Amino acid sequence: MTAQPHDPLRLCVYATVALLGWLLGPWALLGFAALGFAGYLRARRAGLTRSKCVLRDTRLVLAYLGVLALVAAVAIVRPLL
């Protein structure tokens, strides 16, 4: 049995997220930030305190995602005012 070569799936995912961000602008940022926030909030309530994210502490990750969602919401609403 031969070893399978490394599949750089994450790079494809990153490129897809970047494409969606470029096409959808602040709406994509708001969607991904909200989705990430909900996921990390659920994980934190289940007991996760350390993440594989660069920020490590789930409280920091939640704060980061919350700020991103807020910035996206401002970018969406501001032109309407």
Image (cartoon, grey):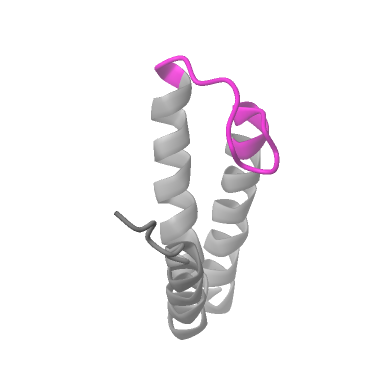
> What is the quadrant of residue 62 in the picture?
top right
Near-viewer residue (21 or 76): 21
Q: Is residue 32 left or right of residue 81?
A: left
Residue at the top extreme of this rendering: 47
How many numbered discs, if any? Answer: 0
**Residue at image location 43% in from the left, 64% down from the top:** 5
- Whether residue 27 appears in this view of the structure is no
Q: Which residues are magenta?
A: 45-61
User: Residue 10 in the image: x percent, y percent?
Assistant: 47, 62
**Residue at image location 51% in from the left, 82% down from the top:** 22
User: Residue 44 in the image: x percent, y percent?
Assistant: 48, 22
> What is the quadrant of residue 68 in the picture?
bottom right
Near-viewer residue (39 or 75): 39
Residue 57, above or below 77: above
Residue 3, above or below 27: above
Residue 79, above or below 30: below
Check if residue 38 falls in the magenta segment. no
**Residue at image location 43% in from the left, 75% down from the top:** 16
Near-viewer residue (49 or 28): 49
Check if residue 60 falls in the magenta segment. yes
- Whether residue 45 appears in this view of the structure is yes
User: Residue 60 in the image: x percent, y percent?
Assistant: 68, 34
> What is the quadrant of residue 56 in the picture?
top right
User: Residue 23 in the image: x percent, y percent?
Assistant: 45, 85
Residue at the bottom extreme of this rendering: 23
